[in-house]
Image (tube, rainbow, N blue to C red):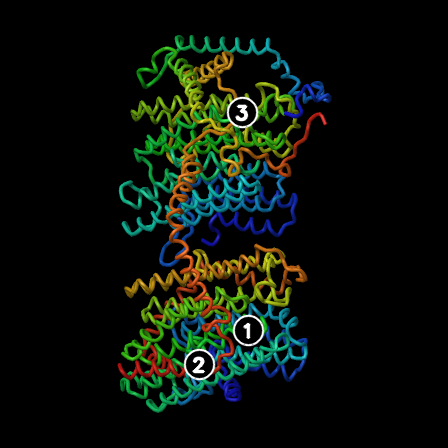
Amino acid sequence: MASETTHDVAHTAMTLIDQLPVLQILIPLVAAPLLVLLGTKRLSWAITFIASVLAFAVSIALLWLVKDGGFISYELGGWAPPLGIEYRVDAANAFVLLLISGISTVILPFAYTSVRAEIAERHHTLFYSCYLLCLTGLLGVVITGDAFNVFVFLEISSLSTYALIATGAGKNKRALTAAYDYLVMGTIGATFFVIGLGFLYMATGTLNMADIAERIADQGANRTIQAAFAFIIVGMGLKAAIYPLHLWLPNAYTYAPSAVTVFLAATATKAAIYVILRFSFSVFQPEFMFETLTFEYLVLPLALLAMFAASFIAIFQTDLKRLLAYSSLAQIGYMLLGIALMNETGITAAIVHLFNHGITKAVLFMGVGAIVLRTGSSFLYRIQGMGRVMPVTAAAMVVGGLSLIGVPGTAGFISKWVLVQGALEKGWWPIAVLIVLSSLLAVIYVWRMVEILYLSSPVVGADKREAPLTMTIPMVIMAGACVYFGFATDITIGASTTAAQGLLGGTTGMIEVIETATQAGH
Amino acid sequence: MSNSPKTNPNDDPSTYPLLGRMMLWTDKKKNVDWIVRGLYAICTALFLADFVYYKKVYLGMEKIPGFYAMYGFFMCAALVICARGMRVFLKRDEEFYAPHDVESEEFPDDQLEKVDYNA
Amino acid sequence: MPDVFPISLIFFFGAALLLLLPKGHLRAALLLIVPILAGTMLWNLPAGNLWTATIMGFDLEFMRVDKLSRLFGLIFCVAAFLGNLYAWHVRDTIQQVAALLYAGSAIGAVFAGDLISLFFYWEGTAIASVFLIWARRTEGAYHTGMRYLIVQIASGVILLAGAAVFYGETGSITFEKMTLGSLGTWLIFIAFGIKCAFPLMHNWLQDSYPAATVTGTVVLSAFTTKLAVYALARGFPGTEILIYIGAIMTLFPIFYAVIENDLRRVLAYSLNNQLGFMVVGVGIGTELALNGTAAHAFAHILYKALLFMSVGAVLFRTGTAKGSELGGLYKTMPLTMIFCVIGAASISAFPLFSGFISKSLILSAASHDGYYVVWAILLFASAGVFHHSGIKIPYFAFFAHDSGLRPKEAPTHMLLAMGLTAFLCIAVGVYPIPLYEMLPFEIDYVPYTTTHVITQLQLLFFSALAFAVLMRTGIYPPELKSVNLDSDVVYRWFLPRLIAKIATGVARVWNAKTSFWITRYNNVVRGLYHTHGPEGRMARAWPTGSMVIWLAVLLGISLLINFVS
């Protein structure tokens, strides 16, 4: 794959803008082996950071190009789809690309200190190499327009994720078990996904998403396609940590190094949610009965279950990282709920929440990471009163907590507001009530966090200093983003609405893509 | 108060600021009487002034000579007497709302700069 | 477009910048620069809707500049400057940030052209200002601040509800002249009314202002209530009920002011009384009356700040602002005394002082439009305000019986702030033309006529005469350490006790049933903990096997649903 892309750049170099989609993947992908080849511990962070910044810049440019509803189609190696691999960027995935690369860029300065504290120095090069691969994988999953390519990138990100989680073993051996468990479960999930793709290929004879969509639209649904949908939803559901398939997540988040937790929590499940969105609305037809029913009778109840059960579990947790992990599960419930509503507002809510929850959780997990740096633990009784000695960290966490609850003026409010609107549009007002009720549960666990941080005295033996600037600045940026996106909704709601419209446009949009691609390609 | 003028041996009027010293005469009962007499005189003059100029007013009652004067005097007297009467019903001990009220508290000293002039 | 931005941002950025500066003169200087910057920018802005943001489909107007909003914005900047100069000595970060955010929110609210941005700033003033009370850092101040915050937040919530209902009724969120009648407009009206301290909604004012810090009260006195007056003038001009509400507002506080002991609370009552004049002006709603309201708000902010500053200086030097403890301070604080007298003369509307040229606009408007009873009440209130603010405050603080306190003169920056404010009070009184030119409507009014000057002097001097006579006959109520019951007794004393009584009664009945329910509740919590707690079934760790089962189950269900359809 890599050689193919490099080759492409060599002989069809047009303007830089035309190459943006491939650069998005190429930059981190090339940087990863570069780290290992250079083998220098000193430069590894810097190269990672530069690669991430460049990827972020590319994703901004991409979102800029498609934010008003356009499409970019990029043919890898000059092979036109459906035979060749196609990267396709529209508002939906450009927005997710922006989230992933943006989060990665902001948290890397945080990771610098955190990784030095939590991971043995000899592993640093490999750690950052894995990190870049994970980033590549997540970006690739999102950007590609080829169904099998999704699986390939998914595996790249998953394998590197297992390794990243395992690096937490230096602090707590249970990280190994967590990584191993995730490996087993993740592989099962990926297998389900690839089985689903197999069915799809069987039914349509193509792997290009747009092409599949067209064929499905032509021939209508049959058993094979229905089975494919079930496998893909369940397989991806595991990656997205839909409620009863979430069991890998709490341990993975708890025992992974803090920097990894921040990155995974803010991006990994989001990429999986994106894939569910893409397959449900662009590849399969939302008009098909089986899809509607699956969402209504399977995803919707599970989403509601997640919103309540995971929140209850979060309330009773004794470890802050784990508390936040369960809260993530509950928040994923909101996104799935938005998808399950299957109307434009609902999908907008899902995409907005995907973004807003990403930045919210980034703040919170970074805060935990900073506290872990000072106390060496994330158990609630060990971090008591740290809010008093780490005022900036704690303040940022409070902002994140407010956003998690959905207090007006924070990003979390915007997405819940849109979600409630989506439920009301559908006439499902009991669901709207449930959304508000589950937010009350969030009040309880966020309050627990605030109480622990502020209302008791620090335990003896903790390092009573504020976190270093490399950690506080990313936190403040993210907390600022939580507030900023609570007011400036142009970017988030605008891009999400365009994305939702594009997704609900279904096949028509996809066919258009192919046409534009053919014209623009050569 | 703890530092009443009798108990404060350092109190020396000659060290007061110039403006303060210039007004010390208002402390004397005799001089206060003169101030009040001055007030009587001004009031009489203002009352009589109503007869010497053309009063350009809108309302009938305003035309009554000394209307504003009478109104001011009697209404204020009534105000004070009513308010005094209200005290019978409304006055409570300073501790009435304590401890949920600032009335019974001392103002925290660290936010003040109490400086005794004589110190 | 890009060179215009919401003026409130200057204050918010100022507050952020403040945190980066070291404590000391640099910060105090920043606190002065911010309002100057904002004021200059404001002065040079053209009229119109200058800055619109679209949020969730609503066009929010953050910079509606016209003559009315510009006048209020300017005087708010002036007040912020004077208040911050007065607070030069304060090194408390919380108070400094709160003062900036508070002024910024108030100015933001003045320029808000729609109900949603108004709501945000409205709550902003509530939240920022409470810290000026809490900054006193006593238990009483904490409780008072809490009461204040609840009332203010309630006002904001009612405003939001009103805005939502109003939007439902009209499909518009523009903040323009409204007509009372529908539920939405009534809610908005009540929200404004709470902040404007309408009768029976007024107690938060007298309760909280004397509880703030020395400098906090000066800042508090300028913004919240005048913002409400502005909102009324913008939203409900010519609403007749306001005339009567305003008249009652001018009337009842003066009785309380006469018997109140805490001089800062006396000033709070007189503030309430002065608001009444402005509300009457809004209610009459003619051009003359609205001009009167705007001019009076302008003059009022200055002289009320001056009075609070002088009493604050006394408190700063002696530790008390109670009439019963003070007296004879002129000997060692003569300058403060003079400034206090200037403020007193201004609020009493002595010719050549600011109150004279603004209050008469409202009185004239009342008599021109035939509200004779209201006019008579206002005249009485004018005499009354002279009585308690004009005479009582300076007399009991600086003269009366010698308390033996010999405090040093107020610090230089306070004298400077007071001197500047006093200068403005006199300047406006002597030469009102520039102020008149800034008023929202064209004005053709000459305050200094023989009739007006002589009748006003008659009113004031005979009021003084009444004071002298009552004082010498011993009828005047002496200053006593006391608390006077106001309508807040209902929620501060009566209701808590009533609830306690009922609670005890209910508890008796309840106790019989309680054990049953407690057991139930405990069982539920225990059950939840059992299933959801760290060791619970729902949260169990190391669950590879169980998840594979779940995976199979879900796939089964999913396939079933797909195939059945």
Quadrant of res A54 = bottom right
Residue A187 shown left or right of residue A460 in the figure: left
Disc assigned to residue C408: none
In the rendered image, residue C399, in percent from the top left (x then y), is placed at 58, 20
Q: The disc labelled 1 sits on which kind of residue?
A: Leu
Disc assigned to residue A144: 2
Q: Which residue is mark 1?
A: A54
Q: Which residue is mark 3?
A: C342
Residue B25 shown left or right of residue A280 in the figure: right
Chain letter of disc 2 in the image: A
Q: Residues within 10 Å of mark 3 (few under 14, many from 20)?
A: many
Q: Which badge, 2 or 1, comes first in the chain's sequence?
A: 1
Quadrant of res B65 = top left
Q: Residues within 10 Å of mark 2 (few under 14, many from 20)?
A: many
Which of the two discs, 1 and 3, sits closer to the camera? 3
A57 and C197: which is toward the camera: C197
Which element type, helix, strand or loop, lies under badge 2? loop
Q: The disc labelled 3 sits on which kind of residue?
A: Ile
Report the residue at 51% width, 84% height from top.
A9
| Distance from Cα at disc 1 to Cα at disc 3 | 66 Å
Q: Are marks 2 and 3 in contact (CB under 8 Å)?
A: no
A490 and C105: which is toward the camera: C105
Same chain, marks 2 and 1? yes
Chain letter of disc 1 in the image: A
| Distance from Cα at disc 2 to Cα at disc 1 | 19 Å
Q: Are marks 1 and 3 in contact (CB under 8 Å)?
A: no
In the rendered image, residue C42, in percent from the top left (x then y), is placed at 48, 43
Report the residue at 27% width, 41% height from top.
C181
| Distance from Cα at disc 2 to Cα at disc 3 | 77 Å
In the rendered image, residue A236, in percent from the top left (x then y), is placed at 42, 80
Residue C206 shown left or right of residue A381 in the figure: left
